[in-house]
Image: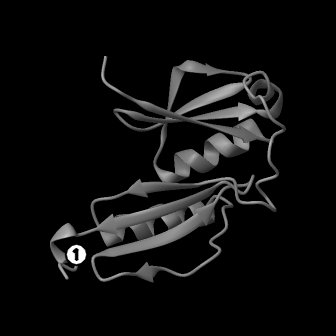
């Protein structure tokens, strides 16, 4: 079996969150979804599990963080172009997400930030490694 990553996020409104992640370009895998969690697929090996607070708590060993007012993590998604970065973030904003900052341009990488309804923070970026500074 290939190595995979599953990011588990506690969400307050499961369907609303699923709709948001669908707008970003994720697809739902119904095989790993039920009324308490939705498996959202970014790529062949990257999955985001949207879990109700009740379901998330069954896995947690600490209290669930209030990600609306505290930053718990920053998740990053790579894309194939700056246009794709802009499309993903624009679709996410239309679906109710928030964009706390403008695009950042590092020369070799451009990134934008979007937050979901629960405050989970995503950096969507395009990187052209051939433009990475060598000195």
In front of the other: 11 or 92 = 11
Q: Is residue 102 left or right of residue 97?
A: left
Left or right: 26 as drawn, with respect to 72: left
Who is closer to the viewer here, 27 or 125?
125
Note whether 117 is above or below 33 in the view shown.
Answer: below
- How far across and how far down the image is residue 113, in percent? 55, 68
User: Front-most of 100 and 63?
Assistant: 63
> How far from the left and from the top, in percent, is residue 107?
30, 83
Residue 76 image point, x, y percent:
47, 56
Q: Which residue is mark 1?
A: 132
**Total labels drawn:** 1
Which residue is found at the position 73% from the left and 39% from the top?
10
Q: Is residue 79 above or below residue 134?
A: above
Q: Quadrant of the N terminus?
A: top left
* Residue 56 to residue 66: above or below: above
Crowd class of label 1 (few under 14; some 14 to 19; many from 20; radius 10 Å)? few
**Residue displayed at 80% across by 28% down:** 57
Q: Quadrant of the C terminus?
A: bottom left
Horizontally, residue 10 falls left or right of residue 6, namely: right
Q: Nearer the viewer, residue 78 or 30?
A: 78
Extreme residue toward the front, this view: 135
Which residue appears at 54% of the width and 82% of the height? 102
The image position of residue 127, as x and y in percent, is 29, 67
Q: Secondary structure at mark 1?
A: loop
């Amino acid at each position: 079996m290939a190595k995979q990553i599953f990011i588990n996020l506690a969400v307050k409104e499961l369907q609303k969150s699923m709709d948001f992640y669908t707008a970003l370009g994720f697809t739902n895998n119904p095989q790993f979804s039920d009324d308490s969690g939705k498996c959202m697929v970014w790529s062949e090996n990257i999955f985001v599990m949207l879990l109700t607070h009740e379901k998330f708590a069954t896995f947690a060993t600490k209290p669930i963080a209030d990600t609306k007012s505290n930053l718990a993590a920053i998740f990053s998604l790579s894309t194939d172009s700056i246009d794709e970065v802009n499309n993903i973030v624009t679709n996410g904003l239309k679906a109710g997400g928030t964009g706390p900052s403008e695009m950042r341009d590092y020369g070799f990488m451009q990134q934008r930030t979007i937050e979901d309804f629960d405050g989970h923070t995503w950096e969507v970026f395009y990187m052209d490694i051939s433009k990475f500074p060598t000195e």
